[in-house]
């Protein structure tokens, strides 16, 4: 996989992306406070792969997705799509690019217009992106419905007439309508029951094969990430702590946070022996992140060095990057 | 063994009568909770697991909801028959509950210590001062640092994990015999979930209460529960010990549920799926409620509803596959062929 990746050119290149938000001050004359939701992350997305971003609430995984879509203007950094910088584009150019980069959100009901039929929604998407002339859209719509496993007569229905799983299929159909290259799935299956979740995950995998799609898959659920990804990126408080191909990450996690995260997932098979790292305390506030390594307040292995100096993301094994001062020592444990 | 039984639910039926018809949210439930035991109730959205817990505490909004049949026996006394006044003495005292979203179940403008103390004053007739001291003690017990300071704070000043700890402290303040936990960790991050689950296990060892643990997460069930009841469309379809359930799931629905879960320690190309969707509670099919989605379905399943039967001593399942009629059905089919 690694040799395969390095020979390819990234379809999306994110470098030193920062996304800060100014929050309301608590009292007059207090300095304005800044939430560093994403604080200098760099990664590549290669054509045809699924890269997952995992992490707990507030780690910046959704913000990263939104920045790439330019739903929020990045504070700093550069996003290159096929070697063209998204940050320097005009609104019009950006609109064209948006056809190439689509998104599927967690709550399909909130992201579908309740007063439009599925037909109107798909038609509008194709009209805006000028995908097909009006006459050919009918056939394309029927094809899309079949692609996502919905009956053609559903085209005339409104979102409220569907179940959660069906709505997510509609969300996927709408994303596919404009022939995207990259789809950002932001917690796309998190709101669904397990049996429905499995249906949607299988659908996403199939569509990726059929249409050569590239997925940026944002999720908090490591079991799902393990199932769907080629590579995984772990975030903590706005930073990448580890990024690696899937097999290496799950077999040999290098960052103590990744280890703790993996060990915290409840599994069905209680006969599997695993050491549980129980983290103390909560995730610190991104308003006032800890100095040095941001994980040091909860890390069982933290030293003075971790408190003072921020570890850089470095390649420890081929294709496996980690941001921890003691990754070599810890991998031996 | 009989005296160990804390709570016994017999043929519980909770229906909702609305303009659309009658929704049979819980439709004939039987289970037993023993002292110190954790019983898991699992199922997908709409299977009736939360309505079960609300029924036990008699918190069903009425109208439209109503317990139309059955008994809920706490030490042999029927909660269904009790007056509002009597049930109020039991709620938060002998039976207490933790909900999924602590922010909506805590009063946002009252210090958390005060909220815990209130239950103690009400049920245990403690003085203001004693109740406050006990409240601080409870906050310490659930592992919140600086309990004296935290007790005086309001819910918005606490993190999600801490709020759930406060909920647990409040639920356990009167040392209840039964704790109902309805998706207590679903809204929390995994590392915080791990902390809360450890805490609950630890407190159960100390206090010895029986826990009814309601969740959709099979991994959490495996970690927490001694026995499991799997619910589907208002009924229990399978009831056995946790270890057995994951080793030999009997009901096709349970098998499907376990199969459709992405596994952390196995590689799968494609996930198993359960075709179709859950039937509407307004209009259940006449036969087995899972029949339309079941890969083993026979005519028998569509025509007649299966009863829950004992397969082995501790294994119960609601499925025709494990009955004598099933064998006859298969023989009939072979004759026709």
Image (cartoon, coloured by chain):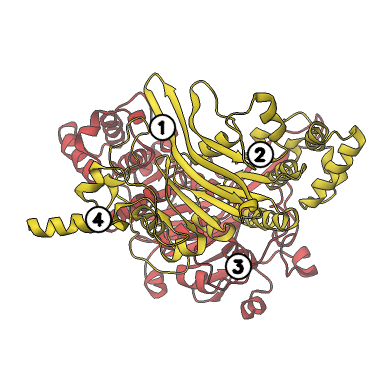
Say which residue appears at 58% left-offset and 37% top-offset. B56
Tell me the shade of chain A.
Answer: red
Q: Earlier in the sequence, mark 2 or mark 4?
A: 2
Label 4, residues with CA under 10 Å away: few <14, some 14-19, many ≥20: some
Q: Are marks 1 and 2 in contact (CB under 8 Å)?
A: no
Q: Residue B234 lies in what quarter of the image? A: top left
- Disc 3 is attached to a residue of which chain? A
Looking at the picture, how far across and down is residue A232, in whole percent? Answer: 49, 62
Q: Is residue A82 visible?
A: no
Identify the residue position indicated by label 2 in the image: B102
Cα separation, mark 1 vs mark 2, equals: 28 Å
Chain the render paints yellow: B
Q: Is residue A247 visible?
A: yes
Cα separation, mark 4 vs mark 3, equals: 48 Å
Q: Are marks 3 and 2 in contact (CB under 8 Å)?
A: no
Q: SS at mark 1? A: strand
Identify the residue position indicated by label 1 in the image: B24
- Disc 4 is attached to a residue of which chain? B
């Amino acid at each position: 996989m690694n040799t395969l990746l390095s020979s390819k050119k990234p379809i999306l290149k994110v470098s030193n992306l920062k996304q800060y938000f100014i929050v309301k001050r608590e009292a007059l004359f207090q300095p304005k406070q800044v939430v560093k939701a994403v604080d200098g992350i760099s990664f590549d997305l290669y054509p045809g792969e699924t890269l997952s971003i995992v992490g707990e609430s507030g780690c910046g995984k959704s913000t990263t997705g939104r920045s790439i879509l330019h739903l929020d203007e990045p504070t700093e950094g550069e996003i290159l799509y096929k070697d063209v910088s998204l940050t320097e584009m005009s609104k019009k150019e950006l609109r064209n690019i948006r056809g190439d980069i689509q998104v599927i959100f967690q709550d399909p009901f909130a992201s579908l217009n309740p007063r439009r039929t599925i037909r109107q929604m798909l038609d509008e998407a194709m009209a805006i992106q000028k995908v097909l002339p009006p006459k050919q859209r009918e056939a394309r719509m029927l094809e899309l419905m079949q692609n996502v496993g919905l009956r053609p007569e559903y085209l005339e229905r409104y979102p409220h007439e569907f179940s959660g799983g069906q709505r997510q299929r509609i969300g996927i159909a709408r994303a596919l309508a404009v022939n995207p290259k990259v789809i950002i799935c932001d917690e796309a299956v998190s709101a669904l029951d397990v049996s429905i979740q499995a249906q949607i995950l299988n659908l996403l995998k199939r569509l990726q094969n059929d249409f050569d799609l590239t997925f940026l898959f944002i999720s908090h659920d490591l079991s799902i990430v393990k199932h769907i990804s080629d590579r995984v990126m772990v975030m903590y408080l706005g930073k990448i702590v580890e990024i690696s191909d899937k097999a290496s990450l799950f077999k040999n996690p290098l960052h103590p946070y990744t280890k703790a995260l993996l060990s915290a997932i409840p599994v069905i098979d209680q006969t599997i022996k695993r050491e549980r790292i129980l983290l103390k305390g909560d995730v610190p506030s991104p308003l006032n992140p800890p100095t040095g390594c941001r994980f040091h307040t909860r890390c069982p292995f933290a030293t003075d060095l971790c408190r003072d100096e921020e570890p850089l993301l470095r390649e420890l094994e081929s294709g496996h990057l980690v941001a921890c001062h003691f990754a070599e020592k810890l991998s031996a444990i | 063994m009989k005296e160990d039984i804390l709570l016994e639910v017999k043929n519980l039926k909770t229906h909702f009568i609305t303009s659309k018809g009658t929704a049979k949210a819980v439709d004939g439930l039987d289970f037993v909770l023993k002292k110190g035991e954790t019983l898991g109730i699992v199922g997908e959205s709409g299977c009736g697991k939360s309505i079960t817990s609300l029924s036990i505490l008699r918190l069903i909004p009425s109208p439209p909801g109503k317990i139309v049949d059955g008994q809920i026996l706490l030490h042999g006394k029927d909660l269904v028959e009790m007056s509002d006044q009597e049930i109020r003495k039991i709620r938060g005292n002998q039976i207490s509950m933790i909900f999924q979203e602590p922010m909506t179940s805590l009063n946002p403008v009252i210090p958390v210590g005060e909220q815990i103390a209130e239950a103690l004053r009400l049920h245990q007739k403690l003085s203001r001062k004693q109740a406050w001291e006990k409240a601080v003690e409870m906050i310490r017990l659930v592992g919140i640092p600086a309990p004296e300071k935290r007790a005086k704070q309001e819910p918005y000043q606490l993190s999600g994990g801490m709020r759930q700890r406060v909920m647990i402290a409040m639920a356990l303040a009167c040392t209840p015999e039964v704790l109902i936990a309805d998706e207590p960790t679903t809204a929390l991050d995994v590392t915080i979930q791990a902390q809360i689950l450890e805490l609950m296990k630890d407190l159960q060892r100390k206090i010895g209460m029986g826990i009814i643990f309601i969740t959709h997460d099979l991994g959490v069930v495996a970690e927490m529960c001694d026995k499991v009841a799997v619910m589907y469309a208002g009924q229990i379809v399978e009831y056995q010990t946790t270890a057995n359930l994951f080793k030999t799931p009997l009901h096709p629905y349970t098998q499907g549920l376990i199969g459709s879960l992405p596994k952390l320690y196995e590689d799968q190309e494609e996930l198993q799926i359960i075709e179709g969707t859950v039937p509407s509670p307004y209009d259940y099919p006449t036969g087995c409620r899972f029949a339309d989605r079941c890969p083993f379905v026979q005519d028998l399943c569509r025509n007649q509803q299966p009863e829950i039967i004992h397969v082995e001593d501790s294994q119960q399942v609601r499925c025709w596959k494990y009955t004598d009629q099933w064998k006859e059905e298969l023989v009939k089919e072979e004759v026709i062929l």
